[in-house]
Amino acid sequence: MSRLSEELRQRCKAYASGTIRLYVSLPKEREEVHILGKQLLRAGTSVAAHSREASSARSDAEFVSKLEVLLQEADEAALWMELLREDCGILLPALPILLEETGALLGIFTTIVAKVKRSDRP
């Protein structure tokens, strides 16, 4: 049985797909954009991977651990997107949409982690 809903797992997969599409559309002839894009690609796609890993966690502690790594990766993805927008002048239409979804996922998973941690208290 999955510890995360199928809907949430699919949302994370769609987020990874959006990250890939954004990366593909970046003007990678600029070295800084290429480097930041690669970082974004790695962090953004790992959100989906960690949601899958969390889904098959064998304990609450393992579940929380996987989700905490997911949160770190999503926050890192947001940083790369912000740097692409603010310092590299990337204004692709997908960027604010993906940043908004990053914030939503951060909120959802932060809430899940907090609830599991509260239920673990004696």
Image (cartoon, helix red, strand yellow):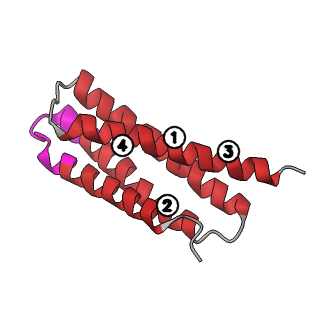
| Among numbered discs 1 and 4, the one appearing first in the sequence | 4
The image shows a total of numbered marks equal to 4
Q: Give the range drawn in magenta.
A: 22-36
Q: Are marks 1 and 2 in contact (CB under 8 Å)?
A: no
Upstream in the sequence, badge 4 or badge 3? Answer: 4
| Nearer the observer, 28 or 26 | 26
* Dot 3 alpha-carbon crowd within 10 angstroms: few under 14, some 14 to 19, many 20 or more: few
Q: Which amino acid does label 2 sit on?
A: Ser
Mark 3: secondary structure: helix
Q: Do the residues labelled 4 and 3 touch (CB within 8 Å)?
A: no
Residue 62 is a magenta residue = no
Single out the mark in the foreground, 3 or 2: 3
Name the spot of residue 87 as percent of width and height, x first.
24, 22
Task: Examine the rendered structure and indicate whether residue 15 appears above or below residue 2.
Answer: above
- Of the residues shown, which amino acid type is indicated by label 3? Ala
The amino acid marked with disc number 1 is Gly
Q: In this view, does 52 lie above or below 77?
A: below
Residue hosting label 3: 114
User: What amino acid is at disc 4?
Assistant: Glu
Check residue 51 in the rendering and tell me which mark sits there, or answer none.
2
Q: Which of marks 1 and 2 is in front?
A: 1
